């Protein structure tokens, strides 16, 4: 299916099924996770969710732009929250590229259909930005399986997840990024403890995850032993491409919502103009990234620009919202005010998660401006 | 133009912009067939303004672009009187002319004064003052005076304006990239405390932010050419203008004392960039005007779709 045909079919399908796809009028995260599964199931059964993914993992083939268009449509219409929806875009490409083919074919449809939630076990208490220093250890036992012991943190959706794409240290700490291996771990394995962390916006979005001598079969290794750094480096550009495109569509909707909700005289044209510019520039950039990806180009460090732009645009939008809607955002206890408050607070993380803006700038300076190593 | 022809044309333009500026550059563009090319293919316009911005040189090519946007024959004898700096609506109100022009206005025999409708007068009818100002190198001209005749000429200003916005935005984006390049090279070469200053994070992050702004401008400019409309042209102009301001600030700081001297080329780029940000409407005013409409109508402008 080409993009034009997909656009037409999806748009009318979304119009026709709006009632079933509309999220519940609830601020409980569990309700939104359950709703996400429903949306994925419906879009999968209507086959939209399968386009843009290879047939080897249950997809229907076609351009990756179809995925961008689907997620953009769902988020722009306010049917799903992009953060939880776009996890698929981050983790499925990794499975396609690095999982044993049988495992990818078995697992990916479950993720696309909303049967399962997956999480991404990268950060650790002592290694947030410095991923190469991670310490969660995997050791090969005499029986041939791997035993994992250690701790992860900031693991989004771990309390809902059936699987985890986990980075472990299999070499020595001195091996740094060369001694890392990735696994696809069942979250119901004995020895895993998940403790949700309450965020400042009142949502248990991420967790601490403890691994105490957890058995992981050898055939759950992603890539080869010691190849975990490559797995991670290939995954990160996905986090900064289609997932961001979806988020941009969502922010455009929020701008519309703000324009509709702002009291008379509360918005300055200069401030709103700056937000429009930033959102537009981000969209222009991110769309070009979508087309490069669709053309088969390998994405890399240049996606750090997309991430930086998105973070700045998002915070600029919510800064304007916080000023214009101050009484509601600060003191309103109705659902709409709670929504703005929660989203404003969440926007503060836009320059932190997925590699902080400082880390992104380091990447830009090193890789795109060729300024050599930092001292 | 096919790809090879465009590349050949672009290389010739580059050679011209390397050797000439001002009226001499106009003549060189002329020899290369620029006036035919611009009517034939908008890629030629994008190429020329990117090259001009890349070198920080001035020409009167914007006159040709606006004339062709108005459906008029772009000839050297005809100059365009653009709205005064910061504005984009008209270069006259009632019978009073107040406009801004390239150096071509000094030598042209006919002045095309933008607004609705488009007016046209013999050049000597208006006062044409050579602008020194902040950017004397570019040879800008301020045009003022009284309109005696009523002669108008067909042509739709908003259409020409959109084309002008795309051209100026392209030059601004390229100027920004050149400023960034100067700062980046300086940071890589300049040694303090026994190491290149580009190894200090404070410096690296300024340059990263400058690249961010440059990429934003390029992205908006590309969309402006690929999906031409008044809106995408305005966004390109506004974003490229803001980008120019951001890059200039960071580049200046990284270039430090060197970039503050008249001997270093940076200041010429910065000054031309400041003027271009105001030519055909200031970036800030354009974006505020757009935003005010959104605020009043409570509807966000259309966003780019896949």
Image (tube, coloured by chain):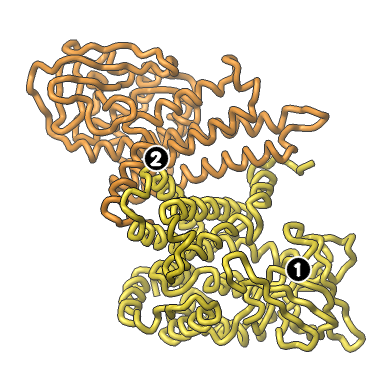
Chain colours: A yellow, B orange
Q: Residue B99 carries which label?
A: none
Q: Is residue A136 visible?
A: yes
| Above or below: residue B280 compared with residue A74 | above
Query: Could you tell me which quadrant the N terminus of chain A lies in?
Result: bottom left
| Above or below: residue A85 compared with residue A284 | below
Who is closer to the viewer here, B13 or B97?
Answer: B97
To which quarter of the image does residue B305 belong? bottom left
Residue located farthest toward the right when viewing the structure as drawn: A142
Q: Which mark is residue A228?
A: 1
How many tags in the picture? Answer: 2
Who is closer to the viewer here, A171 or A329?
Answer: A329
Residue located farthest toward the left when viewing the structure as drawn: B150
* Residue appearing at x 39%, y 49% in the figure: B223
Give the percent coordinates (x, y) of residue B81. Answer: 25, 23
Q: Is residue A54 left or right of residue B202?
A: left
Indicate the secondary structure of the residue bearing disc 2.
Answer: helix
To which quarter of the image does residue B202 belong? top right
- Chain ID, mark 1: A
Q: Name the residue under label 2.
A: B238
| Above or below: residue A370 compared with residue A133 | above
């Amino acid at each position: 299916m080409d993009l034009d045909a997909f656009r037409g079919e999806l748009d009318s399908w979304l119009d026709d099924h709006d009632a079933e796809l509309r999220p519940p009028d609830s601020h409980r995260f569990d309700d939104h996770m359950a709703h996400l599964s429903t949306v994925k199931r419906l879009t999968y059964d209507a086959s939209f969710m399968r386009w843009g993914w290879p047939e080897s993992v249950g997809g229907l083939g076609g351009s990756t732009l179809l995925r961008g268009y689907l997620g953009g449509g769902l988020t722009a219409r306010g049917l799903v929250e992009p953060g939880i929806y776009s996890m698929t875009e981050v983790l499925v490409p990794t499975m396609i590229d690095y999982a044993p083919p049988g495992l990818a074919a078995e697992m990916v449809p479950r993720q696309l259909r909303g049967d399962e939630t997956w999480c991404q076990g990268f950060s650790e208490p002592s290694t947030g930005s410095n991923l190469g220093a991670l310490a969660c250890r995997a050791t090969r036992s005499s029986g041939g399986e791997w035993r994992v012991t250690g701790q992860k943190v900031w693991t989004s959706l771990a309390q809902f997840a059936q699987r985890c794409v986990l980075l472990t240290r299999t070499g020595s700490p001195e091996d740094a990024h060369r001694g890392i291996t990735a696994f696809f771990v069942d979250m119901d394995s004995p020895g895993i403890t998940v403790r949700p962390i309450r965020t400042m916006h009142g949502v248990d979005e991420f967790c601490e995850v403890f691994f105490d001598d957890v058995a992981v079969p050898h055939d759950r290794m992603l890539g080869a032993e010691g190849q975990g750094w490559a797995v991670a480096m290939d995954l990160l550009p996905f986090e900064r491409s289609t997932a961001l495109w979806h988020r941009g569509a969502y922010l455009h909707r929020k701008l519309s919502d703000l324009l509709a909700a702002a009291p008379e005289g509360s918005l300055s044209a200069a401030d709103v103009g700056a937000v429009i510019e930033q959102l537009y520039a981000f969209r222009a950039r991110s769309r070009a990234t979508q087309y490069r990806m669709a053309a088969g180009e390998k994405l890399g460090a240049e996606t750090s620009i997309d991430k930086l732009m998105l973070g700045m645009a998002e915070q600029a939008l919510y800064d304007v919202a916080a000023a214009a809607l101050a009484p509601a955002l600060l003191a309103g206890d109705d659902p709409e005010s709670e929504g703005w408050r929660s989203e404003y607070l969440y926007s503060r993380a836009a320059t932190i998660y997925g590699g902080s803006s400082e880390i992104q700038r380091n990447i830009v300076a090193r890789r795109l401006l060729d300024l050599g190593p930092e001292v | 133009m096919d790809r090879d022809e465009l590349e050949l044309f672009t290389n010739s333009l580059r050679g011209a912009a390397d050797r000439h500026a001002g009226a001499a550059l106009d003549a060189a563009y002329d020899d290369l067939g620029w006036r035919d090319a611009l009517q034939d293919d908008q890629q030629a316009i994008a190429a020329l303004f990117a090259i001009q911005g890349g070198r920080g040189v001035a020409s009167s090519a914007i006159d040709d672009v606006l004339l062709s946007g108005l459906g008029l024959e772009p000839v050297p004898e005809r100059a365009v009187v653009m709205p005064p700096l910061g504005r984009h609506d008209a270069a006259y109100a009632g019978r009073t002319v107040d406009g801004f022009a390239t150096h071509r206005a000094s030598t042209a025999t006919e002045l095309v004064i933008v607004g609705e409708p488009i007016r046209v007068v013999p050049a000597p009818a208006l006062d044409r003052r050579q602008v020194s100002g902040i950017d004397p190198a570019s040879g800008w001209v301020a045009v003022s005076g009284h309109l005696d005749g009523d002669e108008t000429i067909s042509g739709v200003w908003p259409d020409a304006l959109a084309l002008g916005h795309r051209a100026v935005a392209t030059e601004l984006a390229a100027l920004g990239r050149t400023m960034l390049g100067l700062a980046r090279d300086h940071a890589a070469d300049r040694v303090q405390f026994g190491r290149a200053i580009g190894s200090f994070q404070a410096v690296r992050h300024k340059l990263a932010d400058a690249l961010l702004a440059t990429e934003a401008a390029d992205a908006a400019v590309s969309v402006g050419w690929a999906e031409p409309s008044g809106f995408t042209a305005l966004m390109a102009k506004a974003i490229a203008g803001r980008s120019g301001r951001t890059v200039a600030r960071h580049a200046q700081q990284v270039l430090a004392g060197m970039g503050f001297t008249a001997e270093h080329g940076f200041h010429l780029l910065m000054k031309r960039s400041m003027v271009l940000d105001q030519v055909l409407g200031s970036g800030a005013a354009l974006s505020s005007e757009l935003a005010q409409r959104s605020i009043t109508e409570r509807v966000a402008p259309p966003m780019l779709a896949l």
